[in-house]
Image (cartoon, grey):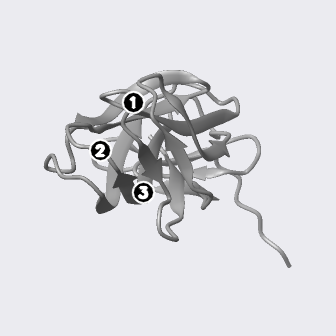
Amino acid sequence: MTSILKVSEIQDPTNSNTALTIDASGNVNIPGHVMQVVQGEYSTVVTTSSNSFIATGLTASITPTSTSSKILVLVSHPSIDKRTNDTYLGLRLNRDGSLIKEITRQDMFNHQTNTTSSNISYTYLDSPNSASALTYSTVFNSGAGNAQVSINWNYGASTLTLMEIAQ
């Protein structure tokens, strides 16, 4: 004989706080737990000498299961290269083409030429309030303009990891 227990919510018996919910699709939502993980990778060298922001080529898309979910974004751009004194690399995180976080706008190269930085890593917790598909990407520029900066220099591969966190 088979038994079936049908519930949509389980609560703590001492304070009635919701411990977990089950939505109409059968997804179990436990606040603070990872619901899904996706990752994008891009390894082609991208170079600019412009102070206008251009795409790094790195993107990843995720469709949250709930509008209350948060998205934990982990960005890693290894092997940043610059060829001119007194410049910096500006790096931004976009969601659906719009700026959500300025990652860096600092001189990472200590005013030296032919300098390579091994990695720029960044973590950001986004609250998109959406259950629609979201595309995250990074863009960069040469802060001084006319000074060359490159991403994925010297065999590097950039990654963008997205984790949906239940709330």
- Is residue 17 in view? no
Q: Decide if residue 163 is on the left or right side of residue 74.
A: right
- Quadrant for the N terminus in the image: bottom right
Lower position in the chain sequence, tag 1 or tag 2:
2
Residue under label 3, please give it: 76
Identify which residue, 20 or 68, lies in the foreground: 68
Judging by the rendered image, the residue that carries numbered circle 1 is 146
Q: Check disc 3: other Cα within 10 Å, few if <14, some if 14-19, many if 20+.
A: some
Q: Which mark is residue 8?
A: none
Q: Quadrant where the C terminus lies?
A: top left
* Image marks 1 and 2: residues in contact by CB distance under 8 Å: yes
- Specify few, some or many for label 2: CA neighbours under 10 Å numbering under 14, 14-19, or 20 or more: some
Q: Badge 2 is on which residue?
A: 84
Q: Disc 2 versus disc 3: distance between alpha carbons? A: 23 Å
Task: Give the total number of marks visible in the rendering.
Answer: 3
Q: Check if mark 2's residue and mark 3's residue have beta carbons within 8 Å.
A: no
x 26%, y 37%: residue: 87
> From what the image shows, is residue 74 above or below residue 135?
below
- Going by the image, does 29 lie left or right of 6? left
- Where residue 2 appears, x then y in whole percent? 83, 74
| Residue extending farthest right | 1
Q: Residue furthest left?
A: 110
